[in-house]
């Protein structure tokens, strides 16, 4: 961003602090930069749109805070999930050898990867905090394949704007935009604290999006869809959580 446009943005941010007229300015700016979140017409309206746009413009490359090994939580809290179902239990009984991650949509080479294959890809790790919107957090080391590596591998088309990710739990799916999809900390995670990712924490495979709240880190993922349009998915807001009234962009 040029210095001038950055200054303009900061000025409009100040206008926001000054009152509601600033919201209109911010919303206009957000539209100009193509930064209207898919749920931007939701109950939170312009204010939420502005938060998203401001984070995208001012901090789109800022990494989530990383911690030291000594800060890893001794007793991380796994949020309870609905019963995982027969198919999951069958896959688990066979050590997940048949777990697959399908990657489809706007890709030159749509591909289905096995877990074993994903484990041979270059791995990255980071020690970050995950936090639930309900208030609790823990710090863990996450290991996995950078989502950007997978996008590269399948020949993601430059027109794509979102990655939709789905779980074996049909009610759990989410999406992120390219700022998060290409961010080096966004991982298709298969490890936690030096071991295979345990089932309560989303094993065998979880999308780890450390720059957003916990509900964007969907567990038990089995499908990624590259798209330029979120409208055809669910109610069209971009995720199961935003379909239910939460924010689509849950930046922290
Ligand atoms: N498939 C699936 N993914 C999920 C959930 C879930 O119930 N099912 N819960 C989400 C919520 S609300 C949060 S806060 C985090 C919790 O992560 P944790 O269990 O590692 O603490 O996982 C998210 N991913
Ligand atoms: Mo949560």
Image (cartoon, rainbow, N blue to C red):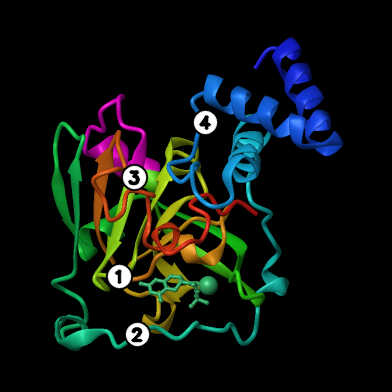
Q: Is residue 114 magenta?
A: no
Where residue 171 is drawn, which disc sits there?
Answer: 1
How far is disc 2 from disc 4 in space, using C-alphas? 34 Å
Foreground tag (2 vs 3): 2
- The 10 Å Cα crowd at callout 3, few under 14, some 14 to 19, many 20 or more, is many
Q: Residue at label 3?
A: 163
The residue mark sitting in front, 2 or 4, is 4
Left or right placement of residue 174 versus residue 87 in this view:
right
How far is disc 2 from disc 3 in space, using C-alphas? 24 Å
> Is residue 135 something one can see in this rendering?
yes
Judged from the image, the secondary structure of the residue bearing numbered disc 4 is loop
Label 3 vs 4, first from the N-terminus: 4
Q: Is residue 154 left or right of residue 29?
A: left
Residue at image position (57%, 61%) is 213
Q: What element carries label 2?
A: loop
Percent position of residue 158, x then y: 31, 24
Stretch in magenta = 148-162
Q: What is the crowding at mark 2: few (fewer than 14 residues within 10 Å), some, or many (at least 20)?
A: few
Work out how far the residue at label 3 is from the one at label 4, CA to CA, in angstroms: 16 Å
Q: Check contact, mark 3 vs mark 4: CB within 8 A.
A: no
Residue behind label 1 places its C-beta within 8 angstroms of ligand 1: yes
Q: Quadrant of ligand 1?
A: bottom left
Q: How crowded is mark 4: few (under 14 residues within 10 Å), some or many (20 or more)?
A: many
Q: Name the element at disc 3.
A: strand
Where is mark 4, residue-wise? Answer: 35
How many numbered marks are there? 4
* Quarter of the figure with residue 227: top left
């Amino acid at each position: 961003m040029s210095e001038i446009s950055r200054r303009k943005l900061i000025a409009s941010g100040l206008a926001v602090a000054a009152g509601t007229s600033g919201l209109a300015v911010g919303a206009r700016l957000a539209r100009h930069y193509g930064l209207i979140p898919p749920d931007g017409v939701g109950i939170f309206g312009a204010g939420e749109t502005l938060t998203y746009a401001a984070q995208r413009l001012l901090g789109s490359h800022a990494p989530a805070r990383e911690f030291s090994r000594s800060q890893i939580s001794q007793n991380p809290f796994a949020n309870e999930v609905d019963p995982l179902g027969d198919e999951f239990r069958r896959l688990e009984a066979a050590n997940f050898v048949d777990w697959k991650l399908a990657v489809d949509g706007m890709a030159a080479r749509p591909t289905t990867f096995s877990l074993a294959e994903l484990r041979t890809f270059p791995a990255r790790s980071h020690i970050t905090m995950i936090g639930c919107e309900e208030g609790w957090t823990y710090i863990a080391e996450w290991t996995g394949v950078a989502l950007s590596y997978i996008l590269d591998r399948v020949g993601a088309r430059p027109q794509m704007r979102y990655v939709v990710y789905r779980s074996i739990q049909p009610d759990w799916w989410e999406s992120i935009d390219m700022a998060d999809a290409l961010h080096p900390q966004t991982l298709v995670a298969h490890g936690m604290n030096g071991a295979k990712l345990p089932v309560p924490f989303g094993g065998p495979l979880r999308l780890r999006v450390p720059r957003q709240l916990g509900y964007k880190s969907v567990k038990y993922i089995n499908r990624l869809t590259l798209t330029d349009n979120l409208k055809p998915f669910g109610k069209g807001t971009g995720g199961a959580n935003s379909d239910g009234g939460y924010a689509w962009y849950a930046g922290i």
